[in-house]
Image (cartoon, grey):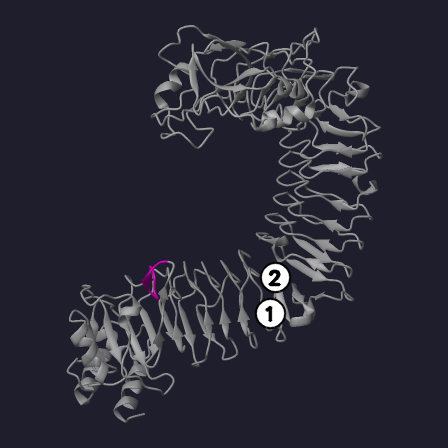
Amino acid sequence: MFTLLMNKKDRSLSVLWLCLIVIVGVLPAFAVQPLQNESIVIGKFRYRLFNLTESEAAETGLPMHYAELYNNDFAGKDNCEWMDFETYDWHDSTVVFPSHVTYNGNSYTVVGIDAWRYPTGEIRNSYCNKPEFESDTMYLKRIKKIVLPDSLLYISSEGSFEHLKNLEIVVLPPTLKMINSGSFSHNQNLRIVALPISLEAINRGVFSHCGIESLYVPKNVRVIDHSAFDGNNLIEIAVDPENPYLDSRDNCNGVLETSSNTLVFARTITAIPLSTQCLGEWLFDCIQFENTSLSLPLSIRSIGPGCFALSNLESITNFDMLPLTAIEQMTFWGSGLRHISLPPTVTTIKRGAFAYTELRHINLPPTVTSIEHSAFASCQNLESLKLGKNVVEFDKSALDNTPSLMSLSVEEGNPKYDSRDNCNAIIQTSNNKLIRGCKSSKIPATVKYIGDSAFCNVAGFELESMPKVSQIGYRAFVGSNVPNVIHVNRSLRVIDSQAFMNCKNLEKVVFDYRENRTLGKSIFSGTDLKTIILAVDVLKHDVIGYCKSLHTVVLDQAVDIDDYDENEDEYSAFNQSRDFIKRIVFDNISGKTSDEVFITDFGLDPDFNATHYLIITPEPNWSRTQWLKSRYRYLTVVGRGDINQDDSVDGNDLNQLINMILTREPGSVNFNDNAEMIADINYDDQIDGSDLNALINILLGK
């Protein structure tokens, strides 16, 4: 016996469907305006009142005087109350809404509920001053029964009666045609609801996460959303046999659209009829099947987006025999799918189709021409993928976050992509751009570009060399195993933002040649970068940002620091790194000189107490040494090799360096000791013979 019953008496109003849509949009025909410009409290509730002429009423099928329950407070008071608490007895657990109200001698028929708010305290409109209602929530939790007026045609505001903790019974009037999304959701004690025969649509999440066990769809319902009863433990589903739009043929415990043979509503209890031709969108979304292997009828011609998303489905028998041309968006997203054979007719793998599944291998039929965004993203167990020769559209994000991927190849003869030299990567042939790699990839010598996110979060990938690469894209090597020291090749002209982000083992970067390079923001953020030797013409804002291990920055003495950020209205080339830097070195990398350096652009204020900064310039008594000292009285400014900090490099510095090498404990430089930081002339964090040779060359003028 069904506990969710339909009303037996057909007392529905003969109101045109188009007129209803206009009404629901709160834009009635003939530019009908509310009587008042604010909600009016009449009796226990708030309303908005409308007046129609006789002809307007006849045209729309509405009363000449009608009202909407309306919580909005245009008067600008602190609260937009759900009800008038001062006049309502909240000790009564039943709420009965009237069908008529009287104002200024006129009787108004209550036809709608609009501009409601969440009972938990959120606002359904933008006019209220305060969007929080913690004080009144306690009253709402007492409601056990709601009786809506016999005159009601629509509930147009979402979530009108959701989250009523103790709600058990809702009496829906026989006139009601439309209930907006989520209106009665999250009422777990709500087990019995009689859907009126007048109802024409069951919208998104209307009764989701309630306690309803049976669903009977009345004869006038044209549409039922797949999520209308999400989270309910439905054990019986049926459609009125007189319904011309929907049916539950073969006692399938599901709902089909009759004209198209599309299964539009289903649960674990649903048996897919053999006459079904289409599976609707998000049909089995979040369903936990008792048997994780599903057999589909061979009559199926299409499967809608998200059909099996987040289900526990592991396999589908007969799937490769279905005449499908596309795997739609998110069809298996987040499901337990472990293995599947695709039909030989499939041409397109759409966005997120297999993302977050348990797939280990997948064989793409030769008919596939397009693989869209995130198609296999976050498949943690996926080990191999081969593109056929007909694939001409492959989105680089299709394999994002696939850490187990070991084999990645392209069939010979593909006109757009290749995997030359058995590189285990996908390369765009026309411009020699590597667009996707895996942890076993090798970068061929002919590759000129590393694409955006090409190795992003490719766990285990080890970068060995990039001999002729001229451009590294956005987030190209995020999280990869790069060498401890990277020497940037002269051919490399562009490094985009966050290219080496979170490459934890990276400690030193050397730009050996001064070139006109374009460097993005936060290239090395999140790394353990300690030293960077940066031979660039212009240093821009936030190039070396968010490096919390960085202690040494070496710049060319003629560098132009031009890093003002208009959006942030600040200067800071080393944003979120500058507090960790111990020494800033201006070296003679390019052989050019400059008479000034713009430390203000570097993120330091003249009054900033920067005692932890040591500035090393190319030679003692250099003009800008004095400029820096005069402008930044808290900085220590010395010439390169001036270990004893007496503004000259001579035998005394040589003797001190020799003594340091002979007497100090072996190990890294103490970055709280200026003398040791100056003595580390070659910036390798050690004080040894190589520094001695460098100091001798300085003394000899080399």
* Quarter in which the C terminus is drawn: bottom left
- Name the kind of residue labelled 1 in the image: Ile
The spot of residue 362 in percent (x, y) is: 72, 49
The secondary element bearing badge 2 is classed as: strand
Does residue 566 lie above or below 533 as drawn? above
Q: Residues within 10 Å of mark 2 (few under 14, many from 20)?
A: many
Q: Residue at x 84, y 35 (%)?
A: 298
What's the magenta bit mostly, secondary-structure-wise? loop
Q: CA distance from mark 1 to mark 2?
A: 9 Å
Q: Please state if 313 lies on the left or on the right of 489 as rendered.
A: right
Tag shown at residue 394: none
Three-letter amino acid code at disc 2?
A: Gly
604 sits to left or right of 16: left
Q: Check contact, mark 1 vs mark 2: CB within 8 A.
A: yes
* Rendered residue at 37%/13% (across/down): 85
Which residue is labeled 1 in the image? 443
Q: Image quadrant for the N terminus?
A: top right
| 139, above or below 457, in the image | above
Q: Position of residue 436 (x, y in %)?
A: 62, 61
Q: Which residue is mark 2?
A: 437
- Whether the magenta-drawn stretch holds residue 569 is answered as yes
* 329 relative to 385, above or below: above
Q: Considering the numbered disc 1 on the image, is that residue within a helix, a strand or a loop?
A: loop
Q: Is residue 649 something one can see in this rendering?
A: yes
Is the residue marked by circle 1 packed among few (<14), some (14-19), or many (20+) residues within 10 Å? many
Rendered image quadrant of residue 511: bottom left
Q: Residue 25 in the image: x percent, y percent?
A: 58, 29
Which portion, as a residue range, is magenta? Answer: 568-577
Residue 145 seen in render: no
